[in-house]
Amino acid sequence: MITESDRLSRALESAAELWPDAQEEKGVLLRRILDAGIVAIEEEKDRRISARLGAITRSAGCMTGIWPATWREELRGEWPA
């Protein structure tokens, strides 16, 4: 059960304007509002994942050459045998 707040009433009115075929059916309008919200959430999730992958791709390889080629041998030489 959902309580119809002022905000939800306004959303239902807007939804009725978008989907006049369902303007008298609050249940149908609510499902369409939910579907639109789900799509928006999925798109935002995909956008964030894409942004993270882009950041990883842009930074990949940026540390090349920072460590000398012999870093492993130098590190091992610091430890007692």
Image (tube, grey):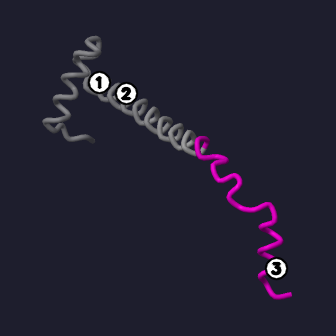
* Sequence-first disc among 3 and 2: 2
Q: Position of residue 39 (x, y in %)?
A: 43, 30
Separation of marks 2 and 1 at Cα, in angstroms: 10 Å
Structural distance between the alpha carbons of marks 3 and 1:
71 Å
From the image, give the main secondary structure of the stretch colored magenta.
loop
Q: Quadrant of the N terminus?
A: top left
Earlier along the polypeptide chain: callout 2 or callout 1?
Answer: 1
The image's mark for residue 29 is 1
Which-is-in-front pick, marks 3 and 2? Answer: 3
> Magenta segment range?
57-81
Residue appearing at x 20%, y 34% in the figure:
8
Q: Say which quadrant the C terminus sits in.
A: bottom right
Q: Is residue 1 above or below residue 10?
A: below
Residue at the image position 25 percent from the left and 40 percent from the top: 2
Badge 2 amino acid? Ala
- Badge 2 marks a residue whose secondary structure is helix
Residue 29 picture location, percent across and down: 29, 24
Q: What distance separates the C-alpha of mark 3 from that of mark 2?
A: 61 Å
Q: Nearer the viewer, residue 59 or 7?
A: 59
Residue 36, label in figure: 2
Report if residue 42 lies within the magenta region.
no
Foreground: 36 or 47?
47
Residue 67 is a magenta residue: yes
Specify the amino acid type for callout 1.
Answer: Leu
User: For residue 24, what is the image quadrant?
Assistant: top left
Name the element at disc 3: helix
Q: Nearer the viewer, mark 2 or mark 1?
A: 2
Q: How many marks?
A: 3
**Residue 38 place in picture, x, y as percent:** 41, 33
Q: Are marks 3 and 2 in contact (CB under 8 Å)?
A: no
Per the rendering, the mark at residue 77 is: 3
In this rendering, the label closer to the viewer, 3 or 1: 3
